[in-house]
Image (spheres, coloured by chain):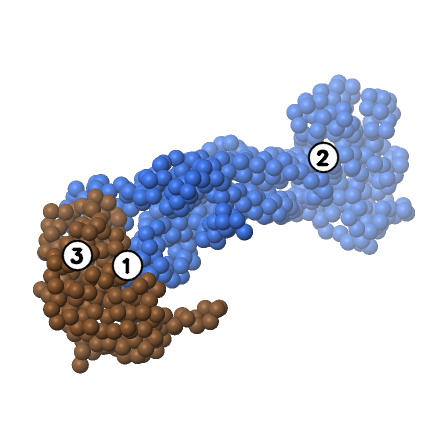
Chain colours: A blue, B brown
Amino acid sequence: MKASKKAAFRLFKKHITRLTTIIAIVLVSVGFMSGVGEVENKIKIAERDLYEQSRVADLKIISNNPFGFTAEEIGKVQEKFGEENVKTGFFYEAEQNGRALRYYIQDTDNPINALELVDGNMPSAPNEILAERETDGIQAHSVGDTVVFTHPITQLETEFTVCGIVNNPLHIYNKAEPSFTKDTDGEYLTLGQVYYTDSEAPFIVNDIYVHIGAKTLGKLFNDSYVENVETLRAETETLLGASATVLTLEENIGLYSLYSYAEKVGQIGIIFVVFFLLVTLLVVYSTMSRLFDEERAQIACQKTLGFSDWKVTKKYVLFVAVGAVLGGVGGFFVGLLLTSMLYNGFNLQYNMPRFPNSLNFSYYAMTFGIILVATVALAILSGKKATSGEPAKLLTPKAPKAGKKVILEKIPFIWKALSFKYKSTVRNVLLFKSRFFMTVVSVVGATVLVFAGLGLFNCAVNYGDAESLMAISAVLIVFSGLLCALVIYNLTNINVSERTREIATLMVLGYHDKEVTGYIYREVYIMCAIGAVLGVPLGMLFVNFVFDFIKFGSLAEVEWWSYVLTPVLTMAFGFISTLLLRKKIVKTDMNASLKTVE
Amino acid sequence: MSYLILDNVIKEYKSQAGAFRALNNVSFALENGEFVVVLGPSGAGKTTLLNLLGGMDSATEGKIVLDGSDVSAMNKKQLTQYRRDDIGFVFQFYNLMPNLTAIENVELATEICPDALDPETVLESVGLGERLRSFPAQLSGGEQQRVSIARAIAKNPKLLLCDEPTGALDYATGKNILRLLHDVCKQNNKLVIVVTHNQALKEMADKVITIKNGEIEGVYINEQPKPIEEIEW
C-alpha cells in the first residue's frame, strides 16, 4: 500500500467514532428528508391512480325531484359528457335507529365510480345485495348476513342476502360521514348503513355519476382540475336548472381531506427538511474544522515534505465524502421505510388505496445531493483554511487564545470561590466562542425540532380526526430526537478527543475517574442546558411559524408537558452521550498522551 | 529498611506476537533525600520503570515498596490515590492545562492533596512570583517547566519523578531546571528520580542507576556529586 493510502486508512481508523457519527447524522437526516418529503407525492399518486382505475366520479348529479330525472334530462347529460362517461342510478335515504340508511340501485358492473369488492362476490341473483365496508359510522356486515327493509318503490318488505362487501371510492373515509337526511332539529344524520343492488336500468334515475378524467381536466385536485370542474358544475346546473344538485370531489370528505392532509405533510416536510439540512451541515462543518485543528501537526508535516495543499486536504475530503455516501445509502432505505410507514399511518383514517409501485427519487436525489455536495464543499473550505498557513507556523501548536480574562474574573469574589474545574470550564466555554457558538446552535436547532414535533403532536391529538398528522409528528419527534442525540454525542466525542492530553494530565495527577469525566461532562452539560433553555422559546417561534404555514394548530394548543419534556430530553441525550463516552475517557492511555507532543 | 525498594520487578507486555519483557528482575533500594539519575539508551526500559514507580502501570511480578506501602499490590483505584497523594511528576513536555494560569495549574494539583503546600509560595520559590497569572502560552519553555515542577512539589509528594525534564529545553534553561530539581531534593529532603539519556548528568547524582535491555546494568554511588554549574555537555 502506498504511504499516502496508509495515512488515509489510519485517519479513518483513528477517527472511526467521528466517521460513524457523521454517517449516522447523514442517515437520519437524509432518511427523514427523503422519507417525509416523498409522502405527499405517494399519496397524490395513489389517489390519482385510484381516480383513473375506478373512474371516480368528477361530478355527482342528484335530482331534487322525487321522481328523478326525466329521460330528456338524462339525455342532455349524456350528450354533454358522452354516454360512456355517465353512469345512472337510483338512491334513497331513510332514518333508521337514529342514523341514515342509504340504498343504491345501480349497474354494479359499470366501470364508472366502480365499487371495489373487499369480500364475497358481486350480486348474481335479485335477492343479493352489496354492503359498504364498516367505518366508524357505517355498521359492520359479513357475507351471508340477512338484511330486511322496505323497498322504497314497491313498499314491499324484502329480504336480501349480503353477497359481498364493497368500498365505494367516494367512501374511503373511515370516520363517520354525514348523510343527506336531516333529523327533526335540522341536523344532518350520520350515515349508518349503505347498500347496493344491481340493476342495469333502475326504474327511477335520481343519481348520475360523471367521470371525465385527468386528460381533460388536469391532475386530480390541482388548480386546473378545480377550475375545470367548477366550470362544468356551473354548466351542468344551467343545463338542468333547479331540478339538480351538482356535487364535485372537493365536497367529498374522503378524497379531498386526504389530499389536503397530503399537502400539509408536504408543507411540514419542506420546513423541516430545510431545518434538518441546516443542522446537519452545521454539525458536519464544525466536526471537520475541529478535525483539521487536531490534525494540525500531521498537516504541517506533510506540507514540509512538499505535499500540495490539495494533496493534504484530499483524504479529509474523502473522509467526509465516505461518511456522506454511506449515510446517504442508509438514508435511502430509511426513507423508503419511513414513506411507507407514514403512508400506511393514514389507514387509521382512510381506506388507503394501494401504495403506488412507482419509484420516485426526486426528494432523495435532492436531499442527498445537497448533503453530499455541501459537506464536501465545507470540507474543502475548512481544509483550505487549515492548510493555508506556512508549514513552520502550522508545526507549532495553535496558540490558545491565552491571556484573555473572561468577564467573570473581574468579579473576584465569585471567581475566587470557583475551584479550578469551574474556572477551566468557564474559560473553555467563553474563550472558544465560535466553537461554543456552533455547538450551542446545533443543540438548539435539534432541540427546536424536538419541540416542534411535540407541539405538532399535541395539536394533532387535539383535532382527534387529524390522525394522519399524529403519525408524522411522531416520526418528527423520533427523528429530531435522534438528530439531537447524535449532535450531542458527536460534540461530546470531539470534546473528549481534543482533550486527551488534559485528561491524561488529570489522571497522572491522581484525579479519580469521576473527577476526570466530570471535567469533560461539565462542559457538555452546560452546552446542553443552554441549548435546552434557548431551544424552547425558539421552538415556540418556529412551531408558530409552522402552524401559520400549514394552517393547522396553534401555540395555545401545545400542552405544558411539551415545554417540560423538550429540555428534559435534551439533557437526557447529553447524559446518555456522556455515559457512552465514559469508557473512552477512563481508558485514556496516560503514557501515549503525555510523552509525545501532538 | 530503605525508603524505596524494588525487588525482582518484572514487567511483561503481551501481544499477538508473544510476550515482551520490558523489565527483567529489576532490584534496587533508594533512600529519602537522594538525587537519583536513571540512565539508559532509548528502549532500555526507563519509561516502563518510571510508569511502575509512578503508579501509572502495574508490575507483572515482584515488589515495589515506597515508604512502607506496597505499591505492587495496589488495585487501579488505590494506584490513583497513590498518584494523588504520594507522587509528583515532571514531564518532558510540561503537560500544563492550556486554559489555566500558572497558579491555577498548581492549584489543580493542590486542590486534591491533603498535605499540599501553598501554591503561591511554591511558584515564588521556583522563581515565578511575577508570572502567577500568566497562561502557559504566554510563558517560555523553561518557565512552563518551572510551573510543572511547582505543580509537582506543591503536592508535597513522597517521590518526585522526572522524565527527561530538560529534553525540550535549551542548554542554559535545562541547567537551571536541573539546579531547581536538585534544590528541591536537598532543601525539602525529597527523593528525586530523574530519567534521562544524558550521560553528563550522572556527575550530579547521589546515585546512578544504569539500565540496558530491561535489566539493571549497575547502581553506582557517587561519593562527591558535582554541582550542576561545573558540568558541561
Q: In which quarter of the image is residue A264?
A: top right
Q: Nearer the viewer, mark 3 or mark 1?
A: 3
Q: Is residue A347 visible?
A: yes
The one of B224 and A102 positioned closer to us in this rendering = B224
Q: Which mark is residue A584?
A: none
Q: In which quarter of the image is residue A444?
A: top left
Please tell me whether residue A510 is drawn above or below residue A148 in the rendered image: below
Count how many numbered circles sit on residues in the image: 3
Q: Name the residue under label 2.
A: A48
Q: Which chain carries label 1?
A: A
How many C-alpha atoms fall within 10 Å of the one at disc 2: few (<14), some, or many (≥20)? many
| Secondary-structure class at tag 1 | helix
Q: Residue B232 carries which label?
A: 3
Please tell me whether residue A210 is drawn above or below residue B44 in the rendered image: above
How many C-alpha atoms fall within 10 Å of the one at disc 3: few (<14), some, or many (≥20)? few
Amino acid on which the number 1 mark rests in the picture: Leu
Residue placed at 39% from the left, 35% from the top? A388
Q: Which mark is residue A506?
A: 1
Are tags 3 and 1 found on a single chain?
no
Mark 1 vs 2, N-terminal side:
2
Amino acid on which the number 3 mark rests in the picture: Glu
Residue placed at 78% from the left, 45% from the top? A166
